[in-house]
Every structure is written in C-alpha cells, then in structure tokens.
Amino acid sequence: MRRALLYLGVTAGALVMLFPFAWTLITSITPGAGLGTPDLVPDDPGLDAYRTLLDAMPFWRILANSLWIAVASTLLQLVTSAMAAYAFARLNFPGRNALFLVYLATLMVPMQVLVVPLFIEMRELNLVDTYAALLAPSIASAFGVFLLRQAVAQVPIELDEAATIDGAGHLRIFVSVVWPLIRPALATFAVLAFMSSWNSFLWPLVVIRSPELMTLPLGLSTLHGQFTTEWDVVMAGSVISIVPIAVLYLAAQKYVIQGVARSGLK
Amino acid sequence: MNRGTPSRRRNRNTLRYGGNRLRYAGIVALFLAPSLVPLTLFTLVPMVSSLWVALHDWNLITPMEFVGLDNFRDLLTDGGTWAAFGHTLGYIAGYLPLVYLLGLAAALALNTALKGRNVFRAAYFLPVVTSWVVVALLWRWLLSPANGLVNHLLGLVGIDGPGWWTDPTWAMPSVILASAWKDLGFVMIILLAGLQAIPGELYDAARVDGTSAWQRFRYVTLPLLSPSTFFVVVISLINGFQVFDQVYVMTGGGPAGSTEVVVQQIYDLTFRYGRAGDASALSWLLFVVVLIVTIVQVRGQRRWVTYA
C-alpha cells in the first residue's frame, strides 16, 4: 500500500516535470496556438510554425552559433584552466598563493557586476556585436582552475618524478602524465562549462545585436518580442533549443549529475 | 588540496630548476598566461573599472563626471532601490522554502529501493539543464491568463484562474513557481547525495530503539542531512539575489514594477535610462549584500549544521 502510494507520488511528480516539455511540442505543431488552448492531440497538426520561425530568424544559424560557442568556450576553458591548475599545484614560484587568491577573488564577482564595464570595454575595443565579444569572458575560468587544481594535486608526484627521470619537461608531463589522469575532473568541468555557455543569457543580451550572431537564449527572447501571442512559433523555437541539450544530457547523464552533485553549480 | 605542496616537493622542484631560473620563469608564464591574460582583461579590469564607473555620473555617451560617493547615497535614499531589494527578498522568501521542500520530497522518495529510480531522477533533473529562457517562455505560456494550460485545467474544475504574470499580485508567484520547477532537480541531486552518505546502521540502531518513522526522520535524517541543506541554502540564496533571466523573459520587471528585482534594475538603469554610474553602484551594493549574507551563513552554520 505504501509502495503503491510512493509510486503514485513519484509518477505524478515526473508528469509535472515532463509534461510541460510535451506541451511545448504539442503547441509547436498546433497552427494558431495561442488563440485558444491547444488540444492534447492536435486536430490538424502542421509544421507552419517552424516555417514562420525560420523565415523570421536565421534559427539554424543561431543554433549553430550556440553550439560552436559552447564547444569553443568549453575547450578553451579546459585547456587554460588545466594549465593554470598545473602551475598552481606543481610549479613553485614567488607569489603563488597570492595569485591563487586573486583567481579566487574573481570567482566571487558575479556577471551582473561586470556586465556594464565589460560592455564599455568591448565598445572601446570595437568588439560590440561580434563573436569575439561573445567568447571573451569565457576563455578562462577561475572556477575551473580551482576545481582542476584539486585534481592535479591528487596525481601522485612520483609519476612526475619518473617522467622527469625519463627526460620529460613540464609541458610533456602536463600533456602525457597529468592530463590523462585528471580526465574525470575534466569531464565534470566540461559538462558545467558547456551548460553555462549554452544557457548564458545576460552577456549575449547586452553585447549582441545582429540576429546572425545571436545564441539560442537570446534568439528565443527576441523571437518572443516579435511573436508575442503566436505561441506555436515561440514553442517551435523552444523545441529546437531543447532537443540538442536534452540529447546531450541523456547521453552524458552520469557526468552531468555527478558534476552538479560535486560542485553544486548549475 | 595540500597534497601537491609539501615542502619536500617544493625542495625537489627548486633543486631541479634552481640552476636555470629564467627558463623556469618562462615555464611558469607559459602555464599561467592562457588563463591570467583573459582573466585580467575580462574580469579584473572590468571589476576595477566598475568601481571607477560607480563614482561617476555617466550616460555611456557624454564624458564621465566625477561625483564621488553620490551614486551610493542616491541609491540608498531612492525608493526604487529599496523596492528592488524588497522584490528580490520576496522572491527568495517564496522560492527557497518551495524549492527545498519539493527537492527534499523528491530526494526522499528516490532514496528508496524504487524500480526505475534512475529514470525518475533523469526526468526530475531535465529542467535543470534547460536554459532559463526556454523555461521562462514555457511558463509564460502555461500561465497565460486567457489560453494557458494551467487556467484551462483550473477552469475544468470550476476555478477561475488568476491573471498570473499580468496581475501585480500574481506576477511574483508566477516567477517563483517557474523557478522552483526548474531548480528542484538540482536541490534533489544535492540532497540525494547527502542522504546516500548517511550510514544505514544508524537507522537500524534507531529501529532497535523502537523509534517511529517520523522520529528517525527528525533525529537521524535531518541532522545528518544538514551539511547538504546548508549547501543548498547558501547556493540558492546567492542565485536568488542574482535572479534575472526568468524575470526579464516572464515579466520584464512588470506589471507595475511588481517584479522589478535588483538585477533587472541594474539592466534597466544601464540600457534603458543610460545611468551607468548608478547601475555600477547598485551592482556593487548587491555584491556586498550577497557577500554579507553568505558570510553570516557560514558563521552561523555552527548552530544548526551537524558534521558527522
């Protein structure tokens, strides 16, 4: 009896969590949705909304932007953070701890504080409304350095020493000894970096104007500005935005959930 | 954390490279520059210049005018600032208990020997990986007063649904509802990890002592879960103070300014009213508030967080 209630509860919960996604899809294939509440099974389903969407906005381009920006910023952050992590864990230089504190300090400043001066800086550099501006704040990640430094520190130093005896320098040790051994931490960080780039909204909103340079969250929000009541069009855009990240999430579920559980970041 | 830095290792490194300092400095630079240069340019410089901008009146176009701390003084005497902090606190007051209780319920349910619990876990977590804009648009549609699904369903059982985000009374609850729906999977994952770390023997021992299920929950689960709870509360408060995406998309701060939260105000001040100085000052004010709140919690955790 109690088990039955438990199942009923979690199933009802799952319905509440998942049905809105189904509703997005249903709305997107119901022409004229928004004029009334769509039916659960549309009478006359159609892809008109997707056509309208693609006429109104270069949506495939926007999708591609989101993808390549997320991939590029993830790769950049992996490399730059892992290298700094190696420096902080393995190299000995004056001011190391002070510099690490500076890295940590940048972690505490939210994007909201940076957004105004960063926008002005981009304007001075003539980079407003460019890919470079979109990517700039996510080349390096202090959080990544912090996370990966722990991982590097846990690699047994004896392995470094063995490699040194074999004549390897630091770059070689980093590439062939440390990097492969911190792969689980790299995977965790990659997932978090990808998600944060994919979902990032405030910075693109501030720095991007042209539809061809927009990322999905920004494209969707301007789409909503254009089609305030044509919910089928807006939901068609949502469907296109959800599918890639949902597929990726289901494929890498273990890493995503571990990553979030470990770091507590979204 | 400290495994990489015992002095034994430091000595070996110094010995190894002591003879060739320049070369060693080059190696350090090689490893640090890829992160240090962008962090300096795109985080440290903006951080410092943001403080500088906060001391000026500036509309982003004409030259800056130095005003000292006037912006801060104006903000503190401006009703809009207090209203924005009030709305943000209102959001947190609704969001935090709701998301915690829902997340806890989900975690407790999934911490049992349930068939298909991984499927349920994946389902509850899906909104977490979805972008805020998608979620906000979806809920704006679900809560649409005229044709939204929620009011349609309420209508079926004879309830006349409210105007949700079009109604100043219901706009903030709408934002809270959408936020809790999106984040409860995150809370669930953190609490689930905490629950799984509680040793089973403790429950066995408590059972032997003849305790009720409620007593075991109250005196075993809750105290041992408190470090995870603490973590959730700290992170949710930080995120709560910085709430923006969902507000911008769902309500834009309206109707009648009823959801004008602090970050929305920073955005409006800069890009709608051309008051970059005030916006920078406000963003630092927000940062200081979040910092103080976080420090107070870390200090206060002794009172209620039990580390096993």
Image (spheres, coloured by chain):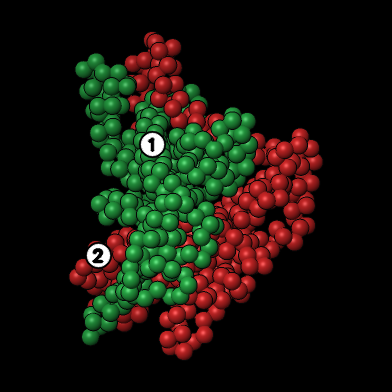
Chain colours: A green, B red
Vertical placement of residue A15 versus B47, above or below: below
Q: What residue sits 31% from the left and 82% below the top?
A: B212
Q: Is residue A258 left or right of residue B251?
A: left
Q: Are marks 1 and 2 on the same chain?
A: no
Q: What residue sits 38% from the left and 68% below the top?
A: A30
Residue B119 got which mark? 2
Badge 2 amino acid: Val
**Depth order, front residue of A102/B250:** B250
Q: Secondary structure at mark 2?
A: helix
Chain letter for the residue marked with disc 1 in the picture: A
Q: Is residue A37 visible?
A: yes
Task: Locate residue B211: give its quadrant.
Answer: bottom left
Which residue in the protein does label 1 denote?
A72
Vertical placement of residue B253 versus B222, above or below: above
Residue count near mark 2 (Cα–Cα under 10 Å), binned few <14, some 14–19, many ≥20: few
Residue B18 got which mark? none
Q: Secondary structure at mark 1?
A: helix
**Depth order, front residue of B75/A130:** A130
Q: Position of residue B105 (x, y in %)?
A: 36, 72
